Every structure is written in structure tokens, then in C-alpha cells.
Amino acid sequence: MKQKIKTIRDLIEYNANRSPDKIFLFFKEEKLSYKDFNIKINKIANGLLKLNVKKNDKICLLLPNMTEFLLSWFAINKIGAIMVPINIALKEKEVSYILNHSDANLIITTDKFLQTILNLKKETKINTIINIGKESFSNVLNYWEIFKDEDEDLKWCKLLEDDHVVYPYTSGTTGTPKGVMLTNRTYILTGKSYAETIGATQDDKIMTPNPLFHINAQCYSTMGSLSANASLVLLERFSASNIWKDVQKYKPTKMVLVLASASILYNRYKDGEDIRTSVEKIIAGGAPKNHYRDFEKKFSVKLQTIYSLTESPLGIMSPKDGISKDGGIGYPMKPPKGYGENIIKIVDEKNEEKLPNEIGEIIIKNQAVMDGYYKDPKATKAVLKNGFLYTGDRGYKDEEGYFFFVGRGKDILRKKGENISAIEVESVINSHPKVKESAVVGIPSDYGDDEIKAFVVVKENETISDEEIINWCLETLADFKVPRVIEYIDELPKNAMGRVMKNKLIEKDLKISYSK
């Protein structure tokens, strides 16, 4: 790029001027050129300004994958406001927490989630609800009605690299979700680095079924496409039975998945099955461990893996050319020129760097790392130390500097691309009147992520069933957080300080196989 691109607005407008007629977005039967995409964003941004949205205001999006998600996100950022994306799988109580904690006063949603927001309005600071759909209420604005007649040009406003643009909420070790404060710089440099690392060009069509409320689809698929002046093919959701039909329809050259989706594909299709595809490369959180070569052979594609966190989207990737090592995650992603280094180390409890092939904690230092957790200085201080982000994840690197991921911190689980706080799940189980205490752990599934398992101690003279516990959790927690494997024990193993020794509960060779 010849001009300095410092903000998301800069990048969108640069592409609109550079390649006005090029198709940026494919979604269902809709196609939007870079020029038309920018015009629609401007109209929405002008409408938001008329609703008195100001710089640094928080606006929540409770939306599935759809064109309006992207338009709303970028309109919010173009006027200096902050997008707060909400996972559409969350239950009402979980949504309420994010609405309140984020201090949002406006939300954009659809018919499917509208009643939830109306139920919560009185207990939150939300004073404006915008709905994308047919439902009509006197206190709800219709998305396209309020934006359709707005100006196509947007007046200039001062935006900076350090401005906060997105607060995605992620689970932490203390149980409550945390708003991760990410800046223009985070998105610009991660998008550029990602595009370079996967070898994306303006000739690429990058397809993803990953949810836009997640950092993966935001920083990689979307910002990567924008950075390469490529096209984005957005799917509604992941479907193993339809994914190759979508490939035939849109003819993408690259596809971005999460670990579980890649594993489902690997397990679903038989060796030798005829899979004709335009896809040259699949980028995923991983593939079935020790099956990287088999994955590439089965689908006749190059596989690149990525390790990152919401707190640091600029992480580790396997090389676009050269050898990817089975079970490994790759080398530190290289930031674009002018954005410093991406320093990643493996350290012990005393903060001393480990030798090659020795396991320790993964710590990261680069300019894409979050500014901290919104309104939570204590949690911020616990993970941002000495200029590094302490991930809590375990790994090692070999003599060539190639990194390998071993496991997540003991109280953070991973399922369907989402972090899950074991403490949050435990607190819900422990609130059941028949439960004395519990411990929640992750056990490896055949899809490469965690299956949630709960060890439960029942109160004296009480009996309880798996169904009771699962239904109790479903009342409060999103489905993906609910334990599906439950074991009842007389007492939890604890150390002298009274802390549960979860390593004693985890059977290292335990594997869960299921056929969803």
C-alpha cells in the first residue's frame, strides 16, 4: 500500500477508491463491490450520527453472519465508536451481563433475538434498539428504514491508530467475561500480517463460515481480505455436509476454519473420496494432531495452522511455504514494516526462558496485544506484565524456533472456537441445591477441541442425575459451555492450601468420540 493506512476507515476507503468495481463481499446471492460496500457503510454511519452516537460510545451487535453485521461494524468504527459483538449462542443472563458491563446504550439485532433484548432493556443502559427484520414495535427502530435515505458521503473525523474499535468479550480465569480492548492498530497490523503469511493477493476469494462475532472472522477472514484487496465469501454457518457445495458455488481459493471444523471435515470424508475443489489452502486453528500431511493429501490443499488469542490476534502460524511440522503451530507471525517485532517466548514460573523442547508458559509481546480488559485493572495486571501478555497456555519450541502447543491454562477450556471459563461453569453447577462442589475440566475430543467434563460431589443424603445437572446449566449457560460428561465422586482432590488438583482428575489417555 502506497499511502499509510492507520485505521479501519482508512483501509475501507482506500480500497473503495483503488478498486471501486471489484467485488468485495459474497453472501448468499448478494454481491457488493468495494465502492457500494463503502457507500452503504457511510449511510449507516450518518444515521448513527443522527441518533447522537459519539466517539467511544459502545454499540452492541447481536447478529448472525450477514451483510449487515459487516456494514454495522465498519459504520460504528468510521465514526469513532466501539463495536461490542455478542455471541449469538449466549443465554439471556449472559447477554445481560455484557450489555451492562460494556455500558452500551444502543444495540443492533434481528427478529430472532429481539424479544431477548426487549426483556433486558429495563435492566440495562440500552435506550435505542435497531432491528433488522419484520418485527415492529413502537420502541424499536427498523434498520433499513432509518438508514436508507442517508447521505452517501461521510464527513471527516479524526481517528487514531490507538483508538479503541472493538471490545469482544472472552472468558477469563475469574469466570466473568471480560471486554478485550482492541485498537485500530490491532486490526490493521494483524490483517496485513495475516494476508502476507497466507500469501493472499487481490486475485483471492477467501471463504469462511466462522462467526463474525468472533475475533477469527474479524481479524483474519475480513481484515485479511481487506488488506489484500481480495474478495470475502461469507457463509451463514459451518456445515460439513454443505461446505463443498459452497466451494463449488463460490469457487474460493482459500478457506478459513476453526480447529473443530477442520477436524470434522477430516473425520467425515473417506480417503479416496472425490472432492474437487478450487481451494488451494485451508487455514485453521489446527487439524487432527499428527495428521497434517494426511489432511493435505485427503483434500489436495495446503494446510496452514494458527495459534492466537482474542487478547493478541497476532500470534503464531505455520509457514506459507516450506515444511509444517506435525503437531506444531509454527513461527511467530511477522508484523508489517513499521510495527516492530512479534516476540514470543516460553518461560517458567520464575519468568526465566526455557531451553528448546522444554515446556513452559507462552508469553507474547507485539503491538497488536490488547490495551487491557475494560473496567478490570486487576485482571489486566494479572496478564500484562513486563510488556508481555502472559497467555496461561503451555507450549515449547524446538531448536529451529518452531512452536508447539501443549495445552491451555487449567481453568480455560476451548470448544467451537470459544474460550470457556471452568470457574463460570463450576459456579452454576455449585448453585444447584443438591450439589456440594464441583470441578470442571477439558478432556480431548476427536474433533481436536475440549469436551467439557464435570466432576461433581453431591450433598449428603441427596441424589442427582446427569439430566438434572445438564438442564440446570442450560437455564443459564450457552449450550457450548454445558458439560456433557459428568462423573460423581466422594470428594475432590485438594492440596494443602485447599485448592483442587485438577491434574489428578484428568486421565491423560481419555478420549471422547461422538458422531454429531
Image (cartoon, rainbow, N blue to C red):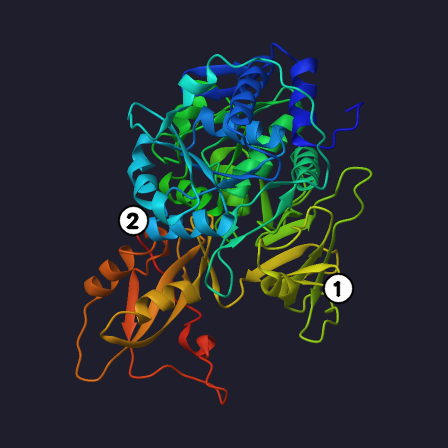
Q: Secondary structure at mark 1?
A: loop
Q: Which residue is mark 1?
A: 386
Which amino acid does the dot numbered 1 rest on?
Answer: Asn
How dense is the environment of label 1, judged by Cα within 10 Å: few (below 14), some, or many (20 and up)? few
Figure check: 229 above or below 479:
above
The picture quadrant where one finds residue 130 is top left
Q: Position of residue 247 (x, y in %)?
A: 45, 25
Hey, what amino acid is under mark 2? Ser
* Label 2, label 1: how far apart the Cα atoms are: 45 Å
Using the image, determine if residue 264 lies above or below residue 254.
below
Asked whether residue 298 appears in the rendered view, the answer is: yes
The answer to whether residue 386 is left or right of residue 36 is right
Q: Position of residue 404 (x, y in %)?
A: 62, 57
* Left or right: 111 in relation to 234: left
Q: Residue at x 40, y 17 (%)?
A: 145
Quadrant where the N terminus lies? top right
Q: Residue at x 66, y 56 (%)?
A: 403
Label 2 sits on residue: 515
Q: Is residue 133 left or right of residue 24?
A: left
Q: Where residue 176 sits in the image (x, y, percent)? A: 46, 60
* Residue 202 on image: x %, y %: 65, 20
Front residue of 173/455: it is 173
User: Element at badge 2?
Assistant: loop
Q: Foreground residue, 471 or 335? A: 471
Of circles 2 and 1, the one toward us is 1
